[in-house]
Amino acid sequence: MNPSVSIIVPVYNAEKTIRRCIESILHQSCGDFELLVVDDGSPDSSGAICDAYAAGDARVRVFHKENGGVSAARNLALEQARGKYIQFLDSDDWITPDATLLLLRAAEEHEADLVISDFYRVVGERVSVKGDIEEGSVLTQEEYAAHMMENPADFYYGVLWNKLYRRSIVERYRLRMDEEISWCEDFLFNLEYIRCARRFYALNVPIYYYVKTKGSLASQISISKTVRMKLTMFEYYNRLYKEIFDEEEYEKHRLKVYRFLLDAAGDGSVPPAILPNAKKLGDERVRVQPETLAEEGVMADAYRERKLLERCLEPAALEHDLTLKEALVLLALGRDGFSGSRKDLAALAGVSLSSLYRALQQLGAKGFVRGGKERLTVMEEAEETMTALEATIADWKSLRLADFTQEEAEAYKALHRRVRQNVRKALQ
């Protein structure tokens, strides 16, 4: 049976970073993938490292070839891919544990031909979020192209690795990387793909850690060749809009389309430096240190259960513009609201009392919660967000019962119900 996702990683002289990259893929909460690693003639130990992973995990396939560049390496992998969707990574980057699951779920639920996501920009020990399309809804080809028109040379649109592609489209139109292009070859592939796709979805959750800083294009190839490549890229870009818009609509936007040439006057291949909302690397998402994971005892068990719930809940919180604490409080309130004390609600949500008051204030400002002395009420405005938060509980339950047979899962649930009844009875 073919996997849902083929994850493609080209590798060249990446012995210092490839382990982190592959580990992040193999530890995905969605295991329904194949990993295609292409060693592009690396003279270092990258190839041997990849082979070791393939020997230990049947999902990993490694291909060795003579050095021919990143586009040739990706093309080789595309020929071998069997998944319904295609996901790309660079060998010196890594992804969040829920990256493939979130991309796949968005594609399936919204029947999207292309899913594009936010990403993390990593500089040293600091990390910031980069995105562009804010509305988390299905976009038509014209709507997506209109967003891209506003920031034509934006890294968000140009790269491969913050997107999920439908392989049937790639194969139907024989879309491949242009091995003759060495400037923004990713963007050229994307432009060709956009021409063939019809439904797009923007995932407002950062799932990818970008750490590679490319050098100036001028230092790598001649100026004359640089100019030719940029003009070629513009021809593809301009053709896309001529096909999408009718003649009258194109004329309205022609100046915006030509803005690409101005934006491409720079290298166009490096995203902005660290942004004002930067955090310390490691503080941006829910994480648990390996030492804590290894602890034994009832308190350690409760802590791990809690952290797993927070990790599952976090993507939905990010997508709906909530902090994790706000999401925990909203989930603790439930659809029927809460009539207990604020102290009890804080304990139920697992936050401090001061954090609870801040979260309630923010939820009130969003129109999600109305407070009173006797009862906190969840408003209709919170309906969509509540549905998204509650859906993450299924992920939490699924991860807890991973590798259980159906019979084992049913037996566990029955026993757990009895344990829960005993605990309630003991606390009465």
Image (cartoon, helix red, strand yellow):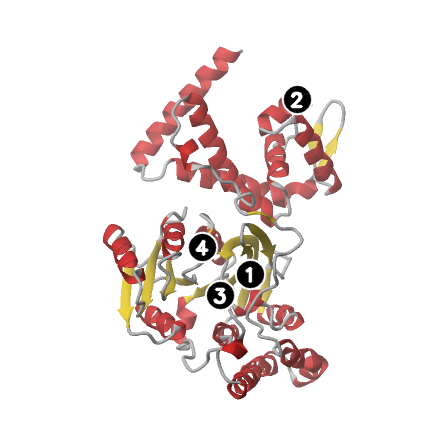
Q: Residues within 10 Å of mark 3 (few under 14, many from 20)?
A: many
Distance of label 3 from label 2 (alpha carbons): 47 Å
Left or right, residue 47 beside residue 279: left
Task: Give, as a three-letter code, the residue at label 3.
Answer: Asp
Left or right, residue 278 beside residue 398: right
Residue marked by disc 4: 94
Residue marked by disc 3: 113
Upstream in sequence: badge 2 or badge 4: 4
Q: Which mark is residue 291?
A: none
Query: At numbered mark 1, what does the secondary structure look like: helix, strand or loop?
Result: strand
Q: Residue at x 32, y 66 (%)?
A: 38
The spot of residue 276 in percent (x, y) is 67, 53
> Residue 51, located in which quarter of the rendered image?
bottom left
Distance of label 3 from label 1 (alpha carbons): 8 Å
Residue marked by disc 1: 201
The spot of residue 238 in percent (x, y) is 60, 82
Task: Give, as a three-letter code, the residue at label 4.
Answer: Trp
Residue marked by disc 2: 343
